[in-house]
């Protein structure tokens, strides 16, 4: 249990007593006065006072204002994070009701432009770090990421992919998925993805709704030391999507495995598209409510239902959530390095939102997750959780610290789960930990 205690000076003892009395368990941490003073929400409230003459005593008042004066709140978010728009908005909020409200009408902007605006300032800094299933490790600087995005986006345009066209991705959590998503957004296309663990039928049920023009797919993926062939699923998926005009395969050697229906090419050839310069590349300005990506419901109560996220909605929502709710106390956005463990769409969609805040991202494949937590997966306490950590360290150092921290505390976690009545059924396989690409000093 974590409490922020932003609205009062309740001490840890009083806070613990109050929450325990409410049946919420034992408080394990409360922020100090210094923590509260340096928090990102306090910084925002200070900015509101200085720039808008708005004063709030604490979180409760700030939250209430955000829900009762929505137009003023979201306009403040727009300016606080310095959103760059090609055409300014005419009105913050028009219409009434959840389904009929339009946000920042008249504005034209691009989510990908906001993601990549940090490229020049952070050119040689790490943007994405990734640990893979086979133990390999890759680092992408902001400059390298920008080059890849411009090349892939230019390749998309050469294929005839433009504003409103749908790009479907049948990919695992790999850096190519993040690049593809940002590139699709850059040209105004609509992105949608699902994991290759999905069968062809489940993927088709989702993608057929958006009538994609391009499919990016993998013919295989690794999971927990096993190679899973998805060639047949890709063949069936292509057959089930009659609107496809192009198919891009992640693997160079997979082209002979897939029937040549739509125009076929490899990811490497797409990523080798001649790159326009930084200044010559154009991010397609789209209306604020232009679709950015489409996700789906689980499909447990009928066919999966499509859910559309817009450029402005995803951008402002992500900046607010990351900066105010996930940032570590006392750190600014530009200092943040995020490491996430997320079971499905981390690098495909959610991670680029962190890049929009200028954060570097570190992700690791399921094999590394297995090394640390496979023995916990039968526990309802841990299974399906999302773990987040932020710090000033470079992404590689952060990964080392995260793995070290987890390794050092496995015994305590085991005891905690046992006390909670959910002990893991299998002991930790230490040999998996030893295979991780970490300094010997860790062990």
Image (cartoon, helix red, strand yellow):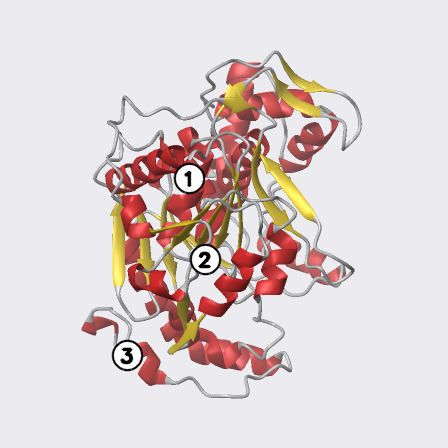
Label 2 environment density (alpha carbons within 10 Å; few <14, some 14–19, many ≥20): many
Where disc 1 sits, the SS reads helix
Q: Is residue 54 above or below residue 226?
A: above
Total tally of numbered discs in the picture: 3
The quadrant in which the C terminus is found is bottom left
112 on left or right of 208? left
Between the residue at mark 3 and the residue at mark 1, the CA separation in whole angstroms equals: 35 Å
The quadrant in which the N terminus is found is bottom right
Q: Is residue 211 above or below residue 62?
A: below
Q: Please report contact status of discs 2 and 3: CB closer than 8 Å, yes or no.
A: no
Where disc 2 sits, the SS reads loop
- Foreground disc of the pair 1, 2: 2
Name which of mark 2 and mark 3 comes first in the sequence: 2
Considering depth in this image, is 236 or 295 the residue closer to the camera? 236
Mark seen at residue 182: 1
Mark seen at residue 171: 2
- Foreground disc of the pair 2, 3: 2
Residue that appears at 27% across and 77% down: 435
Percent coordinates x, y for residue 149 in the rendering: 33, 39
Label 1 environment density (alpha carbons within 10 Å; few <14, some 14–19, many ≥20): many
Mark seen at residue 434: 3
Mark seen at residue 149: none
Q: Is residue 136 above or below residue 178?
A: below
Residue that appears at 49% across and 38% down: 323
Between the residue at mark 1 and the residue at mark 2, the CA separation in whole angstroms equals: 15 Å
Rendered image quadrant of residue 334: top left
Percent coordinates x, y for residue 137 in the rendering: 26, 61
């Amino acid at each position: 249990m974590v409490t922020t205690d932003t609205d009062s000076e309740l001490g840890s003892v009083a806070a613990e007593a109050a929450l325990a009395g409410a049946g919420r368990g034992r408080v394990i941490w409360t922020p100090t006065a210094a923590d509260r003073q340096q928090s990102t929400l306090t910084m925002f409230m200070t900015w509101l006072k200085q720039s808008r003459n708005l004063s709030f005593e604490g979180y409760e008042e700030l939250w209430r204002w955000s829900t009762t004066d929505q137009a003023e709140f979201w306009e403040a978010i727009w300016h606080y994070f310095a959103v760059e728009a090609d055409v300014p908005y005419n009105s913050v909020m028009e219409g009434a009701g959840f389904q009929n409200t339009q946000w920042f009408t008249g504005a034209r902007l691009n989510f990908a432009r906001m993601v990549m605006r940090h490229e020049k300032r952070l050119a040689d800094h790490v943007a994405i770090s990734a640990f893979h299933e086979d133990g390999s490790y890759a680092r992408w600087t902001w400059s390298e990421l920008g080059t890849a995005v411009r090349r892939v986006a230019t390749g998309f345009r050469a294929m005839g992919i433009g504003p409103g066209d749908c790009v479907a991705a049948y990919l695992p959590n790999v850096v190519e998925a993040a690049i593809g998503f940002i590139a699709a957004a850059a040209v105004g296309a609509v992105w949608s993805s699902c994991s290759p663990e999905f069968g062809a039928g489940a993927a088709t049920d989702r993608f057929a709704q958006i009538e994609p023009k391009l499919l990016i797919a993998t013919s295989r993926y690794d999971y927990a030391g096993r190679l899973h062939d998805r060639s047949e699923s890709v063949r069936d998926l292509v057959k089930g999507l009659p609107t496809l005009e192009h198919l891009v395969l992640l693997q160079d050697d997979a082209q002979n495995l897939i029937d040549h229906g739509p125009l076929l090419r490899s990811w490497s050839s797409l990523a080798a598209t001649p790159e326009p310069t930084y200044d010559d590349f154009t991010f397609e300005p789209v209306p604020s409510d232009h679709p950015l990506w489409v996700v789906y419901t689980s499909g447990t109560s009928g066919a999966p239902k499509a859910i559309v996220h817009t450029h402005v909605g995803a951008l402002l929502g992500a900046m607010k959530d990351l900066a105010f709710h996930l940032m570590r106390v006392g750190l600014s956005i530009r200092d943040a390095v995020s490491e996430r463990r997320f079971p499905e769409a981390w690098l495909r969609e959610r991670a680029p939102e962190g890049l929009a805040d200028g954060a570097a991202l570190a992700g690791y494949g399921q094999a590394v997750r297995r090394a640390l937590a496979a023995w916990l997966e039968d526990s309802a306490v841990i299974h399906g959780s999302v773990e987040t950590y932020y710090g000033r360290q470079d992404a590689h150092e952060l990964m080392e610290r995260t793995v070290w921290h987890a390794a050092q505390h496995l015994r305590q976690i085991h005891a905690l789960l046992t006390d909670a009545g959910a002990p893991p059924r299998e002991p930790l396989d230490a040999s998996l930990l030893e295979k991780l690409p970490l300094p010997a000093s860790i062990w």
